[in-house]
Image: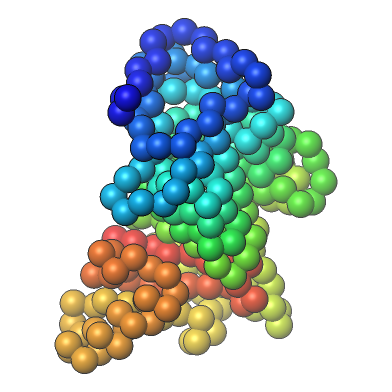
Amino acid sequence: MSHLYLEPGIHVVKGSGYVVIRKPITIYGAGRGITIVKGAFKIKGKKVVDEKVTLAGMTVQDEHHYGLYAYNCLFFHCDRVHFDQCGCGVAVGNTNGKLSNCQITESKLSGVLIEKHSHVEIDGVETKIEMNGTVGGRHWYGLKAETPTSFVHLRLPLTLTMIAVNNYSGGNWKMNRHRNKRSLIEDGDAGMKKYVSTPADDVIVVGSVLDSKQEFERKEGIARMLGVEIGEIVSVYYYHYFCCGILRLCYIM
């Protein structure tokens, strides 16, 4: 089975509360708020090039579990999925994935939690990460990238201030301060970027169309070292990290 359609209505997951996925599959519903899964998804399965798990067109609700738990597993793509009132909306570790037009709201803990050796791309103007961290305390955020190898890629026109708002607990996203410096890349004029209070060494310009072949290859090597997908190298303008690597961001055109 490579495709599974969930009809409109409420679908309750029995047993552990998780739908465990071990092989590539597309699971899709009739739309957010129309197909509702009372339960959660856990992706396993050996990583295989060009194979992935796709979840699309549904609402996922489970206050006791992570709405999506993907750890050391197949690539995942969530398209127009609403993770609502989950223990944690989306948790990723040692895995790559993509969230397109997804909404993560009212999680008890963090809305999106990205752990070590993970690369998550977020795109789509319908994206929102709001009202997460309802359990309180200071450890949970709307978007939290925990380690120096946790990567978040935001595709234009998205910005952090656009998608992560009104979250409780620790705040909208997890950043780091070091030597009283705090950096955030914002959209600039004419499709370029402007950066505020950013030490020069904190920004690497990658893949400019004006680069010579030698310069491009040098930057391509840097991108490989940082874990940026080579197929995306021509569209990456800035790679930015906060000191100590608590949160890493790539803005991709």
Rendered position, 15 above or below 163 = above
Q: Position of residue 131 (x, y in %)?
A: 64, 36
- Quadrant of image for the N terminus: top left
Which one is in front, 73 or 153? 73
Q: Is residue 113 above or below residue 78?
A: below
Relative side of 64 to 229, left or right: right
Residue at the image position 42 percent from the left and 78 percent from the top: 225
- Residue 63 lies, in percent from the top left, at 69, 26
Which residue: 44% across, 74% down? 226
**Quadrant of the snapshot with the C terminus:** bottom left
Image spot of residue 94 (x, y percent) = 53, 57
Residue 110 location, quadrant? top right
x then y, percent, for residue 171: 69, 50
> Relative to 161, is 135 above or below?
above
Which image quadrant is residue 101 in? top left
Residue at (43%, 58%) from the top-left corner?
Answer: 153
227 w.r.t. 216: above or below: above
Q: Is residue 108 left or right of residue 51?
A: right
Taking depth in this image into account, of 168 and 187 the one nearest to the observer is 168
Q: Horizontal placement of 120 versus 3: left or right?
A: right
**Does any portion of residue 129 appear in the rendered image?**
no
Is residue 154 shown to the viewer in this render?
yes
User: In the image as oriented, which residue stretches furthest toward the right?
Assistant: 137
So how many labels did they put on this image? 0
Q: Residue at x 28, y 64 (%)?
A: 232
Most distant residue in the bottom direction? 214
Indicate the colouring scheme.
rainbow
